[in-house]
Every structure is written in C-alpha cells, then in structure tokens.
C-alpha cells in the first residue's frame, strides 16, 4: 500500500481489523470472474459506459486562432473524455459501483460516505437505492449550502445527508466525521471513500475502479487517430478522476501527463494546491502532501470548487510528482471561471468547476504544441451543480433569472 514514501495505513486500532478484512475481500474480488462480470455489466447498462471521446473542434480552432495572433504556429488538437455523460453526471459512479458490490460481498448493509461537491454523495446514494442499502452521507455545512441541488438529489434517492458543523465545514471535516462513524459502527458499516486517498487499500482500490477511464481512452484514441494521445490533462483534488485516466498511460513514455490543482485566490494566498504549496504529512490514514502550518497543523484549503478544496492529495499523486512522471500545474478561481464560460460558449458543454481548472491550463499548453499534437482532457463532471456558485461570482442570482 505504499507509493515510495507515501501511502500506507495510519489508523486507530479499532479500524485495523476492518481495513485488513476489506483488503482481503478486495484481493479476492479482483480475481473473481463473477465480480468482474457484474461490475462490467453495471458499467455498461446502468452507468452508460463507455463514455464518448469527443473532438472539441471549435475550441481547437479558437485556440489555434489565438496562437496565430501572438505569433505561435501551434495549436494542439483537443479531445474531451466525457465522464460528465455518465449516470449521475461525473466519474464518481465508476468507483462507487465497485465499492458497493464489494460491500454486498462482505455482507455490509449500512453504507457511509463523505462528499464535497456532492457528486460522490449522489453516486453513493444512487447505488444504495439500486441495491436497497441504507446510506448516510457526511457533507460539510458550507458545501451543503453551495451544493443544494446535489443535497436534494441525495435526499430524493433516500440517503440521509448529515451537515458537518466542525472545522471549516467542508470536505476534510466531512471525512473526519465519516471516519468517526465507521469506528462506532464496525459490524454492519462499509465506508465508501470517494477519492484515491485514505488508508490502504483505498487509494489502490479507487484507482483500479477508475482506470476504466484511461483504458477506454486508449482504445478510443487508437480508433479515432490510429495512435495514443501526446498529452493528457485532468484536475486534481484528492485525485480519483486524474489517476483513473493517468494510470493506464504511466508506462507509455511518449505521453505527457498533466494534473491541475486549485490555486484558489493565488498560490501566495488561499488555495488548495497541496503539491505546489504543501509538504509531506499524515492525514486520514495515509502519508501524502498536505497544506500545513509551521507547527504541522492542517490548514484549510480554498477553491471555488467544492470538489477541489481538500488540503491534501492522493498518495500516488505525491509519488508521481516526486518521481517526475506527471507534471502538476495549478489554476486560480478566476482562470477556472473563464474556462468554464469559454467551454460552454464554444462547445455547448457546461463543465463542472473541477475540470474547468484543467481546461484553464489546456488553453495555455495547447497553443505551445504543434497542430498534430493530440491532447485529451478529462471532463470529469458536468456543471449543473455549480450554476448557483458561478452566478454568484458573476454578480447574478439564479432566483432573479426569468
């Protein structure tokens, strides 16, 4: 469960038997053809996979035009891996389906989850409704307020949403409360973690379930262009959508890989870029890069996106950063908002604020690449959930719109 110096499992003694039991069941499930068959069947007929690989023609031509204006001859050809078209509107459902099947295999009837932007909470509530399982979702009170549509969706699906009032009342605090719940209900409860972080085996398990993104991208790009892409982009919070598209390409040296963190108000101000502005430490059961003060206390992250304001990152990303295999960049709130609007107007696709961060850097890098450079960006979620946030930043109110 280690990625170089990162990962591992740093948990209370009460949780260790649960973690070991989970690991044993997952290792058995990975080699069970029946488990894989059920997982693949649900991804096809319930989630709606494979998600399309879409050539963003107008965005490509727009960026080529901008490159020409400043005397640059380039302008990469941009494709979108359209995870926002999955059932529930994001990549989160891929991992949730796998974990819920594992929970049923273990005989667990009570499912708990944490959520920030609400997409993992919605996916978990959806899968629990599908299989008739009790579902409790922990969500920071701040995120409950700014992600009301997703809270309503979770309630409609039969989940109980617990608004967490401690700390900054965001994703980190929701995860703290979920872990406390797990300790208190060890017999019947399965903790469905939404990102590629936490104690082993979660980072590896979430990655494995999300690798369907990259596996599909390889096949689809071969069909569309006859070769692999030259570069891949994904946003990074905890990092599940990113590791899902990145991991199948790690052993392909010709493919550049980029992750984009949330720079918030700026890297010298309030942000959530733990790789750019953090240092190694332990949080939520694993060693990784974290935002910490001089005394080692966890600092609060900030991002316009509720899904990217976690003050840490998945341990595999920490290892990939230190090894140099992946280049990690960052984008501010303002840059993400600009990318959000540009994508909507040029392609008729309203992205979530999370992948809008990746798009912000795609706009820069694409202009510096030659025209035969093939670039794929993972559009990991759709922007319905973020419309109130965007409207507020734009000085409008949805209630005033007619």
Image (spheres, rainbow, N blue to C red):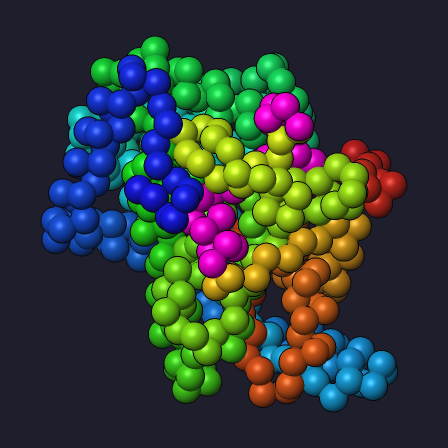
Which residue is located at x 75 percent, y 37 percent? 270
Q: Is residue 124 visible?
A: no
Secondary structure character of the magenta stretch overall: loop
Which residue is located at x 57 percent, y 36 percent? 290
Is residue 316 inside the magenta stretch? yes
The residue nearer to you, when weighing 338 against 373, is 373
Horizontally, residue 362 falls left or right of residue 161, namely: right
Q: Quadrant of the C terminus?
A: top right
The residue nearer to you, when weighing 225 against 199, is 199
Q: Quadrant of the N terminus?
A: top left
Q: How many marks?
A: 0
Which residue is located at x 69 percent, y 36 percent? 302
Magenta region: which residues?
Answer: 294-323
- Measured as percent of width and height from the top left, residue 182 is found at 35, 18
Identify the residue at the far top of this view.
Answer: 184
The residue nearer to you, when weighing 259 against 318, is 318
Rendered view: 123 above or below 166? below
Which residue is located at x 42 percent, y 42 percent? 6
Rendered view: 69 above or below 1? below
- Measured as percent of width and height from the top left, residue 342 is found at 75, 63
Rendered view: 144 above or below 62? above
- Measured as percent of width and height from the top left, residue 160 is found at 45, 20
Horizontally, residue 64 falls left or right of residue 292, namely: right
Rendered view: 52 above or below 24? below
Is residue 234 inside the magenta stretch? no
**Figure quadrant of residue 15:** top left
Q: Is residue 27 visible?
A: yes
Horizontally, residue 6 falls left or right of residue 307, namely: left
Horizontally, residue 387 falls left or right of residue 400, namely: left
- Measured as percent of width and height from the top left, residue 240 is found at 45, 48
């Amino acid at each position: 469960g280690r990625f170089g110096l990162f990962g591992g499992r740093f948990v209370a003694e009460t949780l260790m038997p649960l973690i070991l039991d989970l690991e044993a069941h997952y290792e058995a499930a990975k080699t069970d053809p029946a488990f894989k068959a059920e997982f693949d069947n649900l991804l096809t007929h319930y989630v709606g996979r494979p998600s399309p690989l879409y050539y963003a023609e107008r965005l490509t031509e727009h960026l080529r035009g901008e490159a020409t204006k400043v005397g640059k001859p380039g302008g990469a050809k941009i494709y979108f891996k359209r995870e926002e078209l999955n059932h529930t509107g994001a990549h989160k459902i891929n991992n949730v389906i796998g974990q819920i099947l594992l929970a049923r295999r273990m005989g667990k009837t009570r499912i708990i989850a944490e959520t920030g932007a609400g997409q993992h909470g919605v996916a978990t509530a959806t899968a629990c409704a599908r299989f008739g399982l009790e579902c409790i979702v922990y969500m920071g009170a701040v995120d409950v307020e700014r992600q009301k549509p997703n809270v309503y969706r979770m309630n409609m699906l039969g989940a109980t949403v617990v608004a967490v009032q401690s700390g900054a009342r965001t994703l980190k605090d929701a995860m703290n409360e979920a872990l406390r719940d797990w300790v208190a209900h060890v017999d019947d409860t399965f903790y469905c973690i939404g990102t590629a972080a936490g104690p082993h085996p979660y980072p590896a398990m979430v990655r494995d379930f999300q690798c369907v993104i990259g596996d599909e991208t390889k096949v689809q790009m071969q069909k569309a262009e006859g070769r692999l892409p030259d570069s891949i982009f994904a946003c990074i919070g905890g990092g599940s959508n990113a590791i899902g598209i990145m991991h199948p390409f790690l052993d392909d040296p010709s493919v550049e890989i980029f992750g984009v963190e949330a720079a918030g108000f700026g890297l010298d101000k309030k942000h959530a870029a733990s790789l750019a502005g953090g240092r190694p430490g332990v949080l939520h059961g694993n060693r990784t890069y974290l935002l910490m003060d001089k005394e080692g206390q966890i600092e609060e992250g900030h991002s316009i996106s509720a899904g990217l304001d976690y003050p840490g990152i998945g341990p595999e990303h920490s290892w990939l950063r230190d090894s140099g295999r992946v280049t990690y960049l960052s984008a501010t709130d303002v840059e993400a908002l600009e990318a959000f609007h540009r994508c909507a107007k040029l392609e008729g696709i309203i992205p979530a604020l999370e992948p809008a961060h990746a798009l912000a850097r795609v706009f820069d890098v694409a202009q510096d690449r030659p025209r035969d450079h093939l670039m794929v960006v993972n559009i990991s979620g759709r922007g319905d959930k973020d419309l109130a946030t965007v409207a507020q930043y734009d000085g409008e109110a949805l209630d005033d719109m007619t």
